[in-house]
Amino acid sequence: MLPDLAAVDRTLAAFREGTHLINSSTVPMTVVRPSELIVVTGALAVLLLADLLAVGLGLTAWSGLPLLGMWAPAVLLGFPGDVWPLAWTALAYLLLLALSAAPPGARSDRPRRVGTAVVSAAAVVTLTLVAGPAVATLPGWSSVRVPGLGSGAVGPLRLSEDLDLRESLGDRSGQPVLRYSVSDAEPARSDSDDPLIAQSPAPPTVSARLVGPLRAFTLATFDGRSWQREDADSLVGWDPAQLLSSDPALLFTDPDPQAGVLAQVDIEIAGLREDHLPVATFARTVVVDGGWQYDPLRDEVVGSGGTRAGMSYQMLVQVPDLTADDLRGAPVGRFEGVEQYLAVPQTERSEDIAQTARDVTAEATTPYERALALQTWFRSTQNFTYDTRVAAARTDDAVWDFLTSRRGYCVQFATSMAVMARSLGIPARVGVGFLPGTSQGDGTYTVTGRQAHAWPELFFEGAGWVRFEPTPAVQTGSPRSGPTRS
């Protein structure tokens, strides 16, 4: 606490240690004393610079530049800052401008005004200390909510193409992004003249749950912290009556009622501004107006103009009757360009992640059983907790940080399963889109920004991309029986 002859050396050593920690850490970094010293010193330097401009040089308006500079790191690094510090700083700046513009008569009365302000502040503090505990005990006080800033929807939602595992999710928009209806596209079996068809088991009930989530795009490149989006190499047109699918055997073929359940999906866009059309992960036809094209490599419908409020489009989704037995013995799939779906970022914890994957799947004997073991491990509430808040980074590998903290939301779950599957030699990617939404009771469903979701997809020979759901049921609901193929 008391300075001595070695105080300067200790301070410089702390600065050097803090600088090293800042340079070697990722945002948000763990707060330690050396980094606190640098932050506090920097804030003090900003205060002195603002004081020099406003008081020493009389350039009050220019004192806002160093104050604004305190938010430059958050802006440049792309991390959100709390609105209240910015609001209080802006208020102080406005008061400083008002004081500098006060007439001479008001300046001569400054001692009286300062005294009044000090007495008033002391009275407020005293009243708070005396009355605060009593007011806090009143019934219903805990239910009073302080208004927040910037929590409402300010425009159409757009899905992020750069998923960062280090960012907390925060409040999500409750505004509708799209509405749709699902109906059976096949005649009822009981109406058939064929007695064999009429007596056969009834098909699954056609619903949003059967159709599954609506995927806008997929991500394949991961650097240990975030996913990066790559532009499509080639886009093509398509016949609206034919299927679009990542499975070459189904691509540009006619829908087949014998290959699965056919579901008619009619969608209307609300508050969504997206260059990628949300479509079912299963093979589907797409009827949409405008300049939309198809990316066969990523199985995405892409448009230069994007979606707009009020636009509508239709899909005929072919939901395959795919069971676990169909995939249990399926080998790992291989295709042209598969290397990017097997790449694992090399970090200090890469081998630890791979070893964890081997431990979790030790009793599995086939690739699909290993994938199921990973999904079960992640979905267990004894192992992980769904939480929209993300702990501060501790290593250079965001997946390892998640596996250590055991808390996160869909991006952490999907990414971790994809990376661990890749470490086991199974091609994997992350799909981004929306959960089925909320039923309105009349066969229609509403999807809001809260249903934005990410999930892993793994590739198996003969089945193509198969969707898994490692995120716990608290967000995604109970898993659909059987695997789901894209």
Image: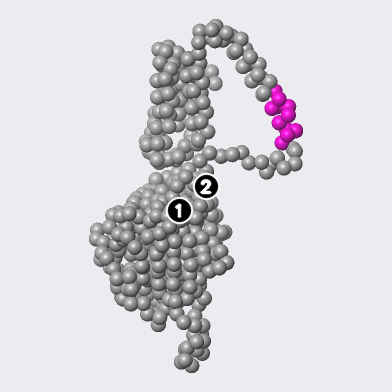
Could you tell me the amino acid type at mark 2?
Asp
- Residue in view at x 47 percent, y 91 percent: 193
For residue 159, above or below residue 14: below
Residue 40 as seen in the image, left or right of residue 116? left
- Residue in view at x 63 percent, y 14 percent: 116
For residue 17, above or below residue 177: above
**Under tag 2, what secondary structure?**
loop
Secondary structure predominantly adopted by residues drawn in magenta: helix
Q: Quadrant of the N terminus?
A: top right
Label 2 Cα crowd, 10 Å radius (few <14 / some 14-19 / many 20+): few
Could you tell me the amino acid type at mark 1?
Gly
Residue 142 in percent (x, y) is at: 68, 42
Range shown magenta:
126-136
Q: Quadrant of the C terminus?
A: bottom left
Quarter of the image for residue 64 reads: top left
Tell me if residue 27 is in the magenta stretch. no
Q: Which residue is mark 2?
A: 171
The answer to whether residue 135 is visible is: yes
Label 1 Cα crowd, 10 Å radius (few <14 / some 14-19 / many 20+): many
